[in-house]
Image (tube, rainbow, N blue to C red):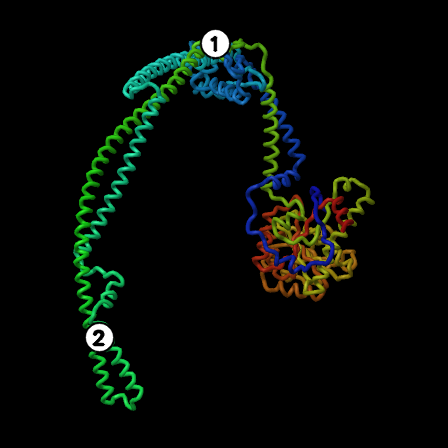
């Protein structure tokens, strides 16, 4: 029967039964348990001790809040009120109103200036302020004032509120007034002085601009006198005429220069013809004309034609081409051809000689004419270049004068505009700087008489809430450090261990209930154990599973209750079952079944009795009990001997199932020695009692020795939630 606090569990899973070989030893264990708590982990830990945390937290919070309220000294608040106008005050000239954003920026700037070190240092320099006890109690009065002095502004209002809270009203008023006076002297008065300096500076600037304007006008008069006119239009006409004459001279210069280049090129060509007479080609048709006029050449051509005709005739009638007449005719033809060629060469030589003499004469005459033309063109070009230089200089001077006049007139216009604007702004500023400052004092601070309750109440509430939170957080952290298992999900997620079942706890209301209601809880317990039994029977049908050890990490985790109920369930299923108490150090099964302690398992280990001698009836059909017996050093030493394997083999042949209740795994090596001879181990985990790191260590030891872990059974589930889960399943 479990008496721990109720916890939720998933209970036995519906549907097809899982393979216990996969659910046990093959389950991977976590490498390490987390050491840093997070929000969900702390909430789960707090859920186990919420009533204690709530009660202790409320008690500590009440005591801390009461102590804070009565131990805090009385607080008073001294206040100075300042007004910040929406825009700069003015007398004559209308100044545009600032936007809301600009006004807010200006007002926030004043808030920062009031708490600036410049103002606070000036306040402390006032007579008697630095000697006040409120300031003497602090090593750095400036830093204390920066932290405690409050400068606030209400939205939509022109009012600035400067306040200081503390236990001494008179000193508070003196300090706040000193800050107000220092702000007025260092910020407001300096602002007025800055306005006056701005008027003086602007007046000096106005004078400088007026002087520069006079100087520029004198320079303009000098330029106009130099140009010979004061009329800009007349000066522009003169400039245009000068540029027209310059353009005409440039065109004439370009024309003469082009003619000179052309004449020089022609001269070079004629000189080349004169120096290379043999390179001159005869006029087309001239040589043919002389051939026709020659009296000798036509006769030679006729003779050549007759010889050629005779040779053609002989060739047509001759049988062989080497006949004497053909040979003689060919020689005659060659002689005629040579005579024609010689005559043509003679005629061509005569013609070329005549042509060379004629070309030489013509070239000499042309060169003489071109020489005269080139000399004239060079003289014209030199004269035009002189005129061009003179006209260019005059045009440049005229253009420079025009540009200087225009620039000087533009400078005078700009300077005149600037001077007028400066003079206008100077007149404005000279009048408006006499207006009152934008910030004014509405109310000086007076020693307050009414105590300020707002901060003490807030501080009291904060101390109470903080104390409550620390207590709750401390209890949650302590529970987290304990790492108790809250539900079956913790075993799955944090330990990576398969959950093969869950057992309900006995609520407080059932402990005080009638027997009929207690039977309801017994039925739920039997259903839970029967689910675990179903898993074992299925596994036993598939492979060898006869001896099952039930153990736990430490004491008080419900292993004995689980072993006894599981053995009874197997007996109810018609299996011959032995419930073996191997918890030699703290046996309990004999008390549960009201049977004698000895002879028992310890006596068998010592060799004093045999196995049949320790078997006892339990009153449940099919269930046999073997008590633990009286433990001593010899019995514990026998656990490590080889005879233990033979003992369990004998039990396998005598019973269908053997359920072993063993000693906790972490307390001693008894369970590890026995576990090496069983078919599987079921680990009992009790909600709100078992600790995850202990369960993890126990599983690790079993795994290191190769002991098959079938899974875990989580006890301590709520009856109500368990019933709902079972009905849903």
Q: Is residue 506 left or right of residue 66?
A: right
Estimate the spatial distance between the alpha carbons at disc 1 and disc 2, rounded to whole Å.
Answer: 134 Å
Toward the viewer: 159 or 227? 227
Q: Is residue 430 above or below residue 663?
A: above
- In the rendered image, residue 157, in percent from the top left (x then y), is placed at 57, 16
Q: Is residue 478 above or below residue 364?
A: above
Checking the image for residue 557, the label placed there is none
Q: Earlier in the sequence, mark 1 or mark 2?
A: 2
Instruction: Classify 10 Å Cα crowding around label 1: few (below 14), some (14-19), many (20 and above).
Output: few
Checking the image for residue 300, the label placed there is 2
- In the rendered image, residue 588, in percent from the top left (x then y), is placed at 69, 51
Instruction: Classify 10 Å Cα crowding around label 2: few (below 14), some (14-19), many (20 and above).
Output: some
Disc 1 marks which residue? Answer: 435
Q: Is residue 675 left or right of residue 189?
A: right
- In the rendered image, residue 185, in percent from the top left (x then y), is placed at 44, 12
Tag nearer the camera, 1 or 2:
2
Residue 523 seen in the current view: yes
Q: Is residue 318 left or right of residue 196?
A: left
Q: Is residue 646 above or below residue 222?
A: below
Q: Which residue occupies 46% across, 16% down?
A: 135
Tag 2 secondary structure = helix
Q: Which residue occupies 67% across, 57% down?
A: 660
């Amino acid at each position: 029967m479990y008496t721990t606090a109720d916890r939720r569990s998933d209970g036995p899973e519906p549907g097809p039964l899982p393979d216990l070989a996969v659910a046990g030893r093959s389950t991977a264990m976590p490498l390490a348990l987390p050491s840093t708590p997070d929000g969900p982990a702390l909430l789960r830990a707090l859920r186990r001790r919420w009533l204690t945390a709530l009660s202790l937290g409320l008690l500590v919070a009440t005591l801390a809040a009461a102590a804070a309220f009565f131990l805090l000294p009385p607080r008073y608040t001294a206040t100075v009120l300042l007004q910040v106008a929406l825009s700069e005050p003015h007398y004559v000239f209308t100044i545009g109103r600032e936007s809301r954003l600009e006004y807010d920026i200006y007002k926030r700037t004043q808030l920062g200036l009031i708490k600036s070190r410049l103002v606070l240092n000036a306040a402390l320099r006032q007579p008697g302020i630095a000697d006040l006890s409120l300031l003497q109690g602090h090593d750095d009065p400036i830093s204390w004032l920066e932290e405690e002095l409050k400068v606030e502004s209400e939205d939509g209002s022109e009012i600035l509120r400067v306040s200081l809270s503390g236990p001494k009203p008179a000193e508070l008023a003196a300090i706040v007034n000193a800050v107000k006076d220092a702000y007025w002297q260092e910020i407001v008065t300096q602002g007025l002085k800055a306005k006056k300096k701005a008027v003086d500076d602007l007046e000096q600037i106005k004078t400088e601009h007026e002087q520069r304007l006079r100087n520029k006008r004198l320079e303009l008069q000098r330029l106009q006198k130099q140009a010979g006119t004061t009329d800009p239009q007349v000066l522009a006409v003169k400039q245009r005429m000068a540029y027209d004459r310059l353009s005409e001279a440039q065109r004439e210069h370009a024309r003469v220069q082009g003619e000179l280049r052309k004449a020089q090129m022609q001269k070079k060509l004629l000189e080349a013809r004169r120096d290379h007479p043999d390179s001159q080609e005869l006029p087309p048709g001239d040589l043919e004309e002389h051939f026709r006029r020659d009296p000798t050449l036509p006769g030679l051509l006729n003779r050549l034609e007759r010889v050629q005709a005779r040779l053609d005739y002989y060739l047509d009638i001759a049988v062989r081409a080497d006949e004497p007449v053909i040979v003689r005719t060919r020689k005659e033809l060659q002689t005629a051809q040579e005579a024609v060629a010689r005559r043509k060469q003679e005629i061509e030589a005569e013609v070329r000689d005549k042509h060379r003499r004629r070309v030489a004469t013509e070239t000499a005459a042309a060169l003489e004419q071109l020489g005269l033309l080139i000399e004239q063109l060079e003289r014209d070009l030199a004269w035009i270049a002189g005129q061009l230089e003179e006209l260019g200089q005059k045009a440049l001077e005229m253009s420079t004068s025009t540009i200087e006049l225009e620039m000087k007139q533009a400078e005078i216009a700009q300077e005149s505009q600037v001077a007028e604007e400066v003079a206008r702004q100077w007149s404005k500023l000279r009048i408006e700087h006499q207006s009152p400052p934008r910030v004014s004092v509405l109310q000086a601070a007076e020693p307050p008489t009414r105590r300020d309750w707002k901060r003490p109440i807030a501080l009291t509430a904060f101390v109470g809430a903080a104390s409550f939170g620390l207590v709750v957080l401390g209890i949650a952290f302590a529970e987290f450090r304990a790492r108790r298992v809250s539900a079956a999900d913790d075993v799955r997620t944090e330990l990576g261990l398969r959950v093969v079942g869950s057992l309900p706890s006995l609520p407080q209301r059932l402990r005080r209930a009638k027997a009929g209601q207690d039977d309801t809880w017994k039925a739920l317990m039997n259903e839970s154990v029967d689910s675990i039994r179903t898993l074992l029977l299925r596994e036993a049908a598939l492979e060898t599973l006869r001896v099952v050890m039930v153990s736990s990490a430490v004491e008080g985790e419900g292993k004995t209750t689980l072993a006894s109920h599981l053995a009874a369930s197997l007996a109810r299923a018609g299996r011959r079952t032995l419930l073996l108490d191997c918890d030699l150090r703290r046996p309990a099964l004999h008390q549960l079944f009201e049977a004698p302690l000895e002879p028992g398992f310890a006596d068998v280990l010592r060799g004093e009795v045999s196995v049949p001698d320790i078997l006892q009836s339990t009153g449940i059909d099919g269930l046999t009990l073997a008590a633990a017996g009286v433990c001593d050093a010899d019995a514990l030493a026998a656990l490590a001997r080889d005879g233990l394997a033979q003992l369990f083999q004998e039990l396998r042949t005598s019973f269908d199932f053997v359920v072993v209740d063993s000693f906790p795994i972490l307390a001693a090596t008894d369970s590890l020695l026995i576990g090496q001879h069983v078919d599987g181990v079921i680990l009992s985990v009790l909600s709100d009692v078992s600790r995850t790191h202990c369960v993890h260590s126990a599983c690790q030891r079993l795994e290191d020795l190769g002991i098959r872990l079938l899974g875990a059974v989580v006890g301590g589930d709520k009856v109500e939630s368990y019933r709902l889960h079972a009905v849903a399943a």
